[in-house]
Amino acid sequence: MPLFRAATPFATPFATPFEVPAALAGAQPAHAVSGAAASPARRRWMQLGMALGTALVLSTQFAGEAHAQTKVRFQLDWRFEGPSALFLLGEQKGYYKAEKLDVAIDAGNGSGNVVNRVASGTYDMGFADLASVMEFYGNNPDAKNKPVAVMMVYNNTPAAVLALKKSGIKTPHDLAGKKLGAPVFDAGRRAFPIFAKANGLQASSFNWQAMDPTLRETMLTRGDLDAITGFSFTSILNLNARGVKDEDIVVLPYPQYGVKLYGNAVIASEDFLKKNPEAVKAFLRAFAKSAKDVIAKPEEGIKAVKARDGIIDEKLETKRLKMALDSVVKSPDARAEGFGRVNKPRLSLMASQVADAFGTKGRINPDNLWTDAYLPSAAELDVLR
């Protein structure tokens, strides 16, 4: 296919647009022919040649620019809800494109699935709970394309135990002998042994009931369960949607009860990091800019979510986003360590706790699954104001 095609024939003195008469076949270069010596026909031909040359250069330049865009396949941990605004606003505002990236952001269905899909190469990057990344390392030490965490976003785990006030549950010790439930892949359920140990409970003494995520809060409201685990900003709003008021909900956030686990981080496959290091850096720069805008104007971020899923309740998702920002993105720990970063001793402790709680095949070396080598500058990471 030609790089340049005229919409209509050029006005030339020749029979066809690109026909060159024999008289011009040995003509001198344009700069060697004076304006006075060149005939009208010859001048018109030289102008046409210059125009075609310019068009060819421009079309080649544009093709090169389009080719320079690096494709990034990115998967979120969950549906297009409030917290996904952190990524989606940057997409809407063109921040990724400005970094010469062609980013496709897809909804997800759990951190464990994101980790597996990044490891398999289905996605290049993703957003997943760090405990799920650690579990993968502990159980798959010989995997050839492991996911690597490159930026911390949820500095604290959003996991919590939730109950209704009428249950009489006020503290972790009140959970003894109670019926607990959560999906088998729920981050709070997986990390419950850490929560139990931190609060003097025997994790093995609890019997859990599993269910689909859509039924978790329903089973709590109708009394099938005494307590559930889940992300606080998800379960609270799900309970609200089922007619339960905030004042009738008891929340025991893991971070407030001795569990200093990190939450969700941006991850990338080892293969993608090796082949596209600059693209990963560019993605994190664009994401940091997007996150800063969302923190400053959450409502603007929800508009970007609405553009991806037109049936969301904007008021509810704005509330969800603000809860997430306050509890895990702008938390005291996040401000102390800095957005995007981790504390190495805390990371090491988490790796040991996850190996014990999840019963991984081997111990977990945190240095293998985390790197800060791709983080933006300190000024670009200053987003928590």
Image (tube, rainbow, N blue to C red):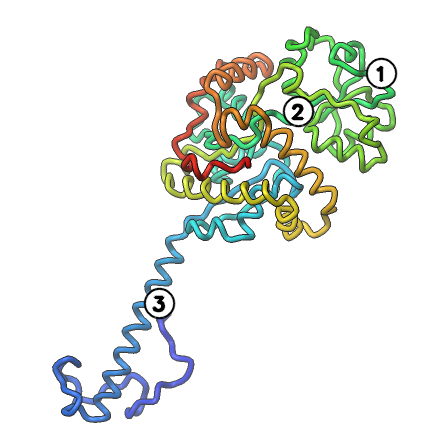
Which class describes the residues within 10 Å of circle 2: few (<14), some (14-19), or many (20+)? many
Q: Secondary structure at mark 1?
A: loop
Q: Is residue 370 rendered to the left or right of residue 307?
A: left
| Label 2 or label 3, whichever comes before in sequence order | 3
Q: Secondary structure at mark 2?
A: strand
Q: Is residue 11 rendered to the left or right of residue 142?
A: left
Q: Is residue 358 above or below residue 43?
A: above
**Residue at the spot of label 3:** 59
Q: Amino acid at mark 1?
A: Gly
**Residue at the spot of label 1:** 168
Residue 73 position in % (x across, y down): 50, 44
Q: Is residue 14 above or below residue 348?
A: below
- How far apart marks 2 and 3 lie (CA) works out to 53 Å
Identify the disc placed on residue 159.
2
Identify the disc placed on residue 328.
none
For the C terminus, give its image quadrant.
top right
Residue 380 position in % (x across, y down): 45, 39
- Which image quadrant for residue 258? top right
Q: Secondary structure at mark 3?
A: helix
- Which image quadrant for residue 21? bottom left
Q: Nearer the viewer, mark 2 or mark 3?
A: 2
Which residue is painted at 58% across and 25% down in the image?
A: 332
Q: Nearer the viewer, mark 1 or mark 3?
A: 1
Instruction: Evaluate if marks 2 and 3 touch, with contact meaning CB atoms under 8 Å apart.
Output: no
- How far apart marks 1 and 3 lie (CA) works out to 71 Å
Which residue is painted at 27% across and 86% down in the image?
A: 19
Which residue is painted at 62% across and 16% down in the image?
A: 259
- Which image quadrant for residue 1? bottom left
